[in-house]
Amino acid sequence: MQLRNKTLVWSAAGLLVVGAATGLSAQTLLQHPASSEAAPSSGPVAPLPPGSAPNYRAIVANNQAAVVGITTQGVTKTSNQPGFPGPGNSDDPFAQFFFHGMPNPQPRVMRAQGSGFIVSPDGLILTNAHVVAGAQEVTVKLSNHQEYKAKVLGSDKTSDIAVLKIDAHDLPTVQIGNSDQIAVGDYVLAIGEPFGLEETATAGIVSAKGRSLPGDGYVPFIQTDAAVNPGNSGGPLFDANGRVVGINAQIYSNSGGYEGVSFAIPINVAVQIKDQLVKTGKVNHARLGVEVQTMDQTLARSFNLSSPNGALVAQVVPDSAAAQAGIKVGDVILKVNGTPIIDAGQLSASVGMMTPGSTVTLDVWRQGKPLSVEAKIGSASAELADNDAGAAAHGKLGLSVRPLSPQEKSQVGVSDGLLVEDAAGKAAEAGIQAGDVVLSVDGTPIDSAAQLRKLVDAHSKEVALLILRGDSRIFVPIDLG
């Protein structure tokens, strides 16, 4: 599998992006008749015993009016020259690097489509952060075809949650459920706008819980087999009782379309993020400060463990909560506050849901012996400020990066490197984008944000970064002047 934008082969599940320069719009991609008015509500869906078949008709009738379509618009610039392939018209992912610096950059209008759902009668809407990323204008369309300009109250890339607000009142809303109570095998139903097709409902079951996807360790995804396609991003996932238990966010796909596996953000995570965004406009994530990998039977035997459970510590971030608590490379974290840790993703999700500053008890296996360690959980934003601050904050590069996990290093075949989580300023102008891997600076391999900052700060005019994108590597010169 290759490292792609945001994840390896995990795609943003439903963001339909259209470039105005192509002359296409969502409507010309797929022509479809206008949707009819929402069916009259038949009242609340009666609670069902676990395993009972749901009344999908009632769930759709009661909730489709609260599901909205979201269209965004932004402007990007490309350097196209007549007769030459540029980043706007080439399939080569590195074309923009080869043509960096070409004159006459052309503005290009980019539009994207997604879904969302209303959570309060005064116009509060939940969707995915990637649906509104880079948007200069956001339009929300209700099921009765009324359209509103929306304000982005806040957006959190880590959890992929965004909160919108429209100037409206007495709107229909969804009923929020409890994602902790769903189980594998439970019925679920998704409503959204795949390919711009309004009020589309698809059904399936929960096929797994607590999935940790590459680059998304914070979110314990709900895996389903409900069909999700471009345009579904940000739409609700309902349980058999018609309550929202997730937000459709990603798919596993080699083609870009649905191939039987979809992923939703648990609503309990989304609500926690929503409350912080509404209150402060930002999110403060908890951080332990370790890179971990999932145990297998071979590793378990080598560490004298009876079962392949727990999270193996591969790296400890200096001055982090883990470092201050005495966690060491080679430790296996078996429990958090008494709850067994099955794999690395569960540890990341458990810590991510905590409040920075709280104290956590870790049951650790070290050199064949158990021990208990207390750690005061740190703040991810504070650590980023300490460890990753020069580039984006001081305007040199404009990169937000993190070290590759051991699994990611193995998958892309590198020993060092930093994953680009966001690109702006000079780096973005040079063509670097989220999902790229920075391997070296002027030929010096890098494995930490602090090292990247130090090497860049030593240059006043220009610097060359070795970038990995897919299977290709290329040096990208960046003008720092």
Image: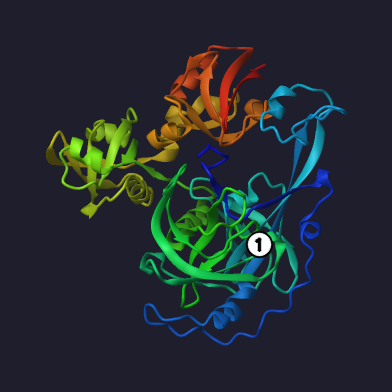
- Residue 47 image-quadrant placement: bottom left
Q: Position of residue 147 (x, y in %)?
A: 75, 65
| Residue 81 visible (yes or no) | yes
Q: Quadrant of the C terminus?
A: top right
Q: Position of residue 370 (x, y in %)?
A: 13, 41
Number of residues whose C-alpha sits closer than 10 Å to that of mark 1, classed few (under 14), some (14–19) or many (20 or more): many
Q: Of all residues shown, which one is farthest toward the bottom?
A: 42
Residue at point 47% right, 42% down? 215
Reply above or below: 474 against 363: above
Q: Amino acid at mark 1?
A: Pro
**Count of all numbered marks drawn on residues in the image:** 1
Q: Position of residue 317 (x, y in %)?
A: 34, 30
Q: Nearer the viewer, residue 378 or 199?
A: 199
Reply above or below: 43 against 247: below
Q: How is the image coloured?
A: rainbow
Q: Of all residues shown, which one is farthest toward the right?
A: 82
Residue at point 40% right, 60% down? 208
The residue wearing badge 1 is 194
Q: Secondary structure at mark 1?
A: helix
Q: Position of residue 331 (x, y in %)?
A: 22, 36
Residue at point 26% right, 32% down? 324
| Residue 171 visible (yes or no) | no
